[in-house]
Amino acid sequence: MSNLSFPVDSMPKFLKEFSKDIADVYGVPIEFCVVSLISGFASAIGSKARLKTEKYINYSQFWFVIVAPSGTGKSEPLAVAYKPIHEHEKAEFIRYKEDMKNWQTAKSNGDPLPEKPKQKRITCSDTTPEALFELLSENPALTIYRDELVGYFQDIGRYNRSGEVAHYLSCFDNRQFSIDRKSSDMPIFISKPILSMVGTVQPEVIQKIANGNSMRENGYLQRCLFVYPDEVSSPPYSKKELKQDLVNNYEKAITYLLNFPETVEYELSQEAGDMYVSFYNEMTSATNGIPDDYMKALYSKMKIHALRLALVLAVIDTVENDGTNEVSGEVMRYAVELCRYFVETGRKMYAPPPPPNLTSGDLYRALHQTYGIKNQTKFAESLGVSQQTVSKALSVMQT
C-alpha cells in the first residue's frame, strides 16, 4: 500500500495477538482490528486515566472513521471490541430501570425523594445533538458508536448553522461550553467534555459528505483519524473462530477498566518525552512548510493525537504487564508510527488518489468539481495543453 502501510511490529503484545486473530477469523485488514480495539479500550477508560504534560491534560479521546466499501467486513472488528462494553451497558440499564421504579414508587407515596436516578452510559448511537450533549453532561465520558456513520455526518451538515459544530470542536479540546434551551428547561453545562466517536463509512460517501458540508473548512475532518486502506476485498466464508483465551483476556481487561473507580495520572518517561518533542517539532516544521490550511490543521492535530494514543497504549501495557503509570519509549514510538499513518490517510481524505485508467478529461473534471477552475487559459498553460482541450472536457459536465 505504498506509504499507507499500517504499522504492526511495535504495538503492545496483546493488542497485536488479538488483532491478528480477529483479522484472520474475519478476513479483514489488521488496521480495522487494531483501531477497533484501541477505541474499545479508550471508551472503557473514559475519564479514568489521563496523561499530564508540562502544559496540558490529555484523555483517551478519538474520532475514528473506518473507510471501506460495503461488504468488506469492516463492522465485525468493532462488534468484537464493543461486545463487553455493550453487555456492561445492558446490565446498567437493568439497574437504572429498577432504580427508577423505586424512585417513582417513593414519589407516588409522598416519601422523601433521593436524587433522581441517571442512566450511566458509555456509548450512544442515533441521537439528536441536544440529546447527545445532555447525555454528555450526565456522564464523565461518552462514545458515539455507529456502525454506519453516514447519518451522523449528514447531521453535522444539518445542524451546522445552529452552532452544533462549534460544540463538537469544543469537545475535541475538552473545553467547557453551555447550551441554552427553551425557557422551561434548564440550560446544559458541560465542564469537561470527553466525547469519542467510532464507526464505518464507504469511501464515496465520506468524500461526498466532506465536499458538501464544509467539514474540511470548519476543521472537523482534520480531527478525525481515518483507517483507509488502498484496497479491501470482500472476505470469503470461513469457519474459523476467535481464540477464546484472547477473547477472555480482552473482556477481563475491559471489565477491569469499566469498574476502575479512580483517576490514574500518567507521565512521559524521559525517553518518551524526547521522542514526543522530536515528533512535535517534525509536525511543526511540516505545518510551517506548507501553505494549505487543511494540511496545516492536520499536522497540528497530530501533536495531540500522539499523546492520546500514547495514553491508551500505556494503559493497555499497564493492564497487560502490571506496569507503572509511565509512558515508555516503546509505547510512544508506536503512537508516533500510528500518527504518521493517520497523516497519510488524512492526506488521502483531502486529495484522494485518482481511480485507475483515469483519462485527462476525467482529471480536469475532477479538479474542477473539487477546487473550481476559474481561469481555463492559465490552467491549460500550467499543464502544457490547449485551452480548447480543457474547455471541451469541462463542457461534458454540462451536457
Image (cartoon, rainbow, N blue to C red):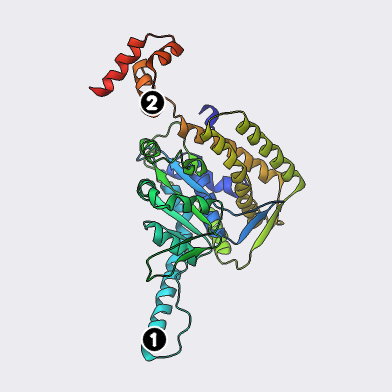
10 Å neighbourhood of mark 1: few (<14), some, or many (≥20)? few
Identify the mark nearer the N-term, 1 or 2: 1
Left or right, 211 with respect to 321, comes to: left
Which residue in the protein does label 2 denote? 372
Q: Position of residue 299 (x, y in %)?
A: 58, 37
- Work out whether residue 216 or residue 41 is closer to the camera in this orientation and state it: 216
Residue drawn at (44%, 49%) of the image:
165
Q: Is residue 392 above or below residue 99?
A: above
- Give the amino acid at mark 1: Lys
Q: Position of residue 334 (x, y in %)?
A: 63, 41
Q: Position of residue 115 (x, y in %)?
A: 48, 80
Q: Is residue 245 above or below residue 202?
A: below
- Work out whether residue 347 or residue 31 is closer to the camera in this orientation and state it: 347
- Give the amino acid at mark 2: Gly
Which residue in the protein does label 1 denote? 107
Residue drawn at (41%, 27%) of the image:
371
Q: Secondary structure at mark 1?
A: helix
Residue drawn at (44%, 12%) of the image:
383
Left or right, 76 with respect to 299, comes to: left
- Work out whether residue 281 or residue 70 is closer to the camera in this orientation and state it: 281
Q: Secondary structure at mark 2?
A: loop
The Cα–Cα distance between marks 1 and 2, rounded to whole angstroms, is 63 Å
Q: Position of residue 264 (x, y in %)?
A: 66, 61
